[in-house]
Image (cartoon, rainbow, N blue to C red):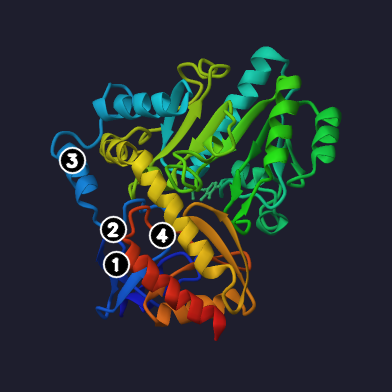
Amino acid sequence: MNIFEKDSAFVANTYARFPVALVSGKGSLVYDQNGKEYIDMSTGIAVNTFGIADNEWINAVTEQLTKIQHASNLYYTEPCAQLAQILCERTGLKKVFFSNSGAEANECAIKTARKYAADKKGKDYTVIITLKNSFHGRTITTLSATGQDVFHKDFLPLTGGFVYCEAGNTEQLESLVKNNKVCAIMFELVQGEGGVLSLDKDFVNAIFEIAAKNDILTIADEVQTGNGRTGALYSFMKYDVLPDIVSTAKGIGNGLPLGATMMGEKVKDVLVPSSHGSTFGGNPVACAGAVSVINRIDDKLLKEVNEKAEFIINSLKNANGVKSVSGMGLMLGIETEKDASEVINYCMDNGVLVIKAKNKVRLLPALNIPFSLLEKAVEVIKKGCAL
Ligand SMILES: *Cc1c(COP(=O)(O)O)cnc(C)c1O
């Protein structure tokens, strides 16, 4: 059997894969089973922050790998503590819980919010407001938090206590707060899976005002937007707000599974021994890699991210076959006149990997993609949109 036959025979049928097997790569170039070269504009869905087989990250990871690969959370390990310190110092949040994925980072955020309210406001303050069209993960609870019916329908009953607000609708938000015992409002500042849609600055301000007035926690799901992706270390910095809880995953690990839930002053001591845990969480190898990732996301790199974003937007926004470009930093969505899948397949045939978000072509290149490759990729995308 070849790899395609073997995979479809033995791997659970949950993914509609492209008919391509990725074998190796370097930076923003990746090669398939036939040796065909692609410019990677998808980075494994915003995961490979510094591209494929990045030397600095490999050094950090392999150095740790030769010392100790796992210790359990019954003992201290240096990379975990070091990463937590760096994250707190760079964000203004106060403590970090580590896990292995975005869904788990959000589970921790949800548990923290519920326990904060139970400790402080009363056990009936359990409701979390999330946004319509959001995406927060695939576990039953993060699925329940996800404001899209299509993901829900086959998995009822969902976890209770989630109500959904239309993004941008402050009136609805106020009425949901009035009519429910709310402990938190949870949102992506740029909805990724929902179609690369940035929240309105005014609406974000309204969330924070309403939350402050009612002692409601704010939870920013930065699983996709975090770690430099939007041109700030975390996208809340672009909105000039400081959430009580920030979850992240994807790009922090550069390819190794790692989730982080950062907790602000109000909630930093809500979780206590035995209230939460994770066997792999804070794994020293993943954390050592993440330390190298976060340390490289400095002002200089972020400036480059914003310049690259500007270049992509300017090249595409008035291009033939392009209706609009949305998003922030190197997390962009192209609304195309043609079906997005047609454009994606054209790009793939012509050596550029891009993916979909709802009806859009989504671009998530490595933060350090060289300008020369970016220019080449944008040319191909432009042609794909225009045909
Ligand atoms: C990808 C994603 C998740 C889920 O992350 P997993 O690592 O797949 O569990 C949650 N929230 C957002 C915003 C995401 O983009």
Q: CA distance from mark 2 to mark 4?
A: 11 Å
- Residue type for callout 4: Pro
Q: Residues within 10 Å of mark 4 (few under 14, many from 20)?
A: many
Q: Are marks 2 and 1 in contact (CB under 8 Å)?
A: yes
**Residue 134: x %, y % from top left:** 65, 49
Task: Indicate the secondary structure of the residue bearing disc 3.
Answer: helix
Task: Indicate the secondary structure of the residue bearing disc 4.
Answer: loop
Task: Indicate the secondary structure of the residue bearing disc 1.
Answer: strand
Along the polypeptide, which appears first: circle 1 or circle 4?
1
Q: Which mark is residue 29?
A: 1
Q: Are marks 4 and 3 in contact (CB under 8 Å)?
A: no
In the rendered view, does 185 fall on the left or right side of 97? right
- Residue type for callout 3: Leu
Along the polypeptide, which appears first: circle 3 or circle 1?
1
Residue topped by disc 3: 65
Q: Is residue 248 above or below residue 7?
A: above
Along the polypeptide, which appears first: circle 4 or circle 3?
3
Q: Residues within 10 Å of mark 3 (few under 14, many from 20)?
A: some
Q: Which mark is residue 365?
A: 4
